[in-house]
Amino acid sequence: MPELPEVEALKDFLTEHVVGHEIVRALPAAVSVLKTYDPPVTAVEGHEVTAVHRYGKFLGLETDGGLHLVTHLARAGWLHWRDRLPDGPPKPGKGPLALRVALETGEGFDLTEAGTQKRLAVYVVPDPQQVPGVARLGPDPLAADFDEPRLAGLLSGERRQLKGALRDQSLLAGVGNAYSDEILHAARMSPFKLAASLTEPETHTLYEALRTTLTEAVERSRGLAAGRLKAEKKSGLRVHGRTGEACPVCGDTIREVSFSDSSLQYCPTCQTGGKPLADRRMSRLLK
């Protein structure tokens, strides 16, 4: 799933390529992708893109007609830039294509989604806050005003484990499964440590790991073409998706805990005092 760094990079890429240009066609290839119907997605046609915004993991195009085209790429979605779009409308229900946006230059982009679980979402709204997922977002961890006391306040009284708390978009916007693993590895903390149990020094450590991990990921992605972002994300991850490999910090074997619809990766030496975590949903450290 694209997370804050990749969506930030897509925002920068689209700012360079679509701002100042007119949307001449907005063509859905899968009806399921449209989560709003009034105004229709075609209402953005004939209007110029004036800005591109990121809201957590949501990406939005602002137009001079007062409408915003907002999308969430979900787990298997992606944006593909085309220097020249194919002639003719896309065929509904054929392949992974969900939505095509064409500019007056002949350029544009496709939103695609692999797999059978169609969760990619597109909204056309006068105000991005009308998108439920945007309205419930917590603070952005890279915002200038997101300081250490604010993180401490969010975690105070939070009875969930750190892994779940970091992934909750209503608590903190933009961090998903991959970067929560990376942040906790950088902070040398167990994913199952209770958020409310953090001491002041531990909160400081987590804050520094959060900001540094995300900032470095954004910098690695900055300036890359949309098609290269997935590979850059994978190459920059130190523990997530690297089960069985050696930890780049200590050399221990990276372990995994699997759940029904996801998994997490961690280093026992760096994060859990050398003890592996039980591989079940309500894991505790093995005795």
Image (spheres, rainbow, N blue to C red):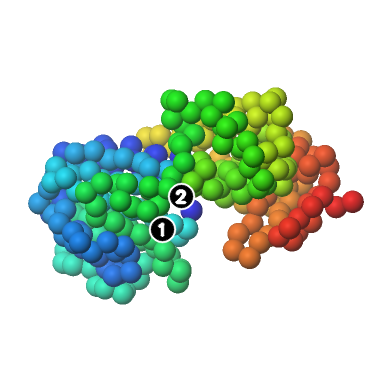
Q: Which residue is most to the left?
A: 46
Q: Amino acid at mark 1?
A: Gly
152 lies above or below 109: above
**Are circles 2 and 1 on residues that touch, CB within 8 Å?**
yes
Measuring from the top left, give residue 41's x and y in whole percent: 20, 59
Residue at point 71%, 29% (across, down): 199
Q: Which residue is most to the bottom?
A: 93
Is 54 on the left-hand or right-hand side of 108?
right
* Residue beneath disc 2: 2
Camera-side residue: 130 or 176? 130
Is 192 on the left-hand or right-hand side of 105?
right
Is 67 on the left-hand or right-hand side of 135?
left
Measuring from the top left, give residue 248's x and y in whole percent: 69, 37
Is 132 on the left-hand or right-hand side of 167?
left
Residue at point 71%, 54% (across, down): 256
* Residue beneath disc 1: 77
Camera-side residue: 282 or 114? 282
Measuring from the top left, give residue 125's x and y in whole percent: 24, 52
Residue 195 in which image quadrant: top right
Measuring from the top left, give residue 212's x and y in whole percent: 56, 29
Distance of label 2 from label 1 (alpha carbons)? 8 Å
Q: Which residue is most to the front?
A: 157
Q: Residues within 10 Å of mark 2 (few under 14, many from 20)?
A: many
**Under tag 1, what secondary structure?**
strand
Residue 204 in which image quadrant: top right
Q: Amino acid at mark 2?
A: Pro
Camera-side residue: 284 or 30? 284
Can residue 43 be seen here?
yes
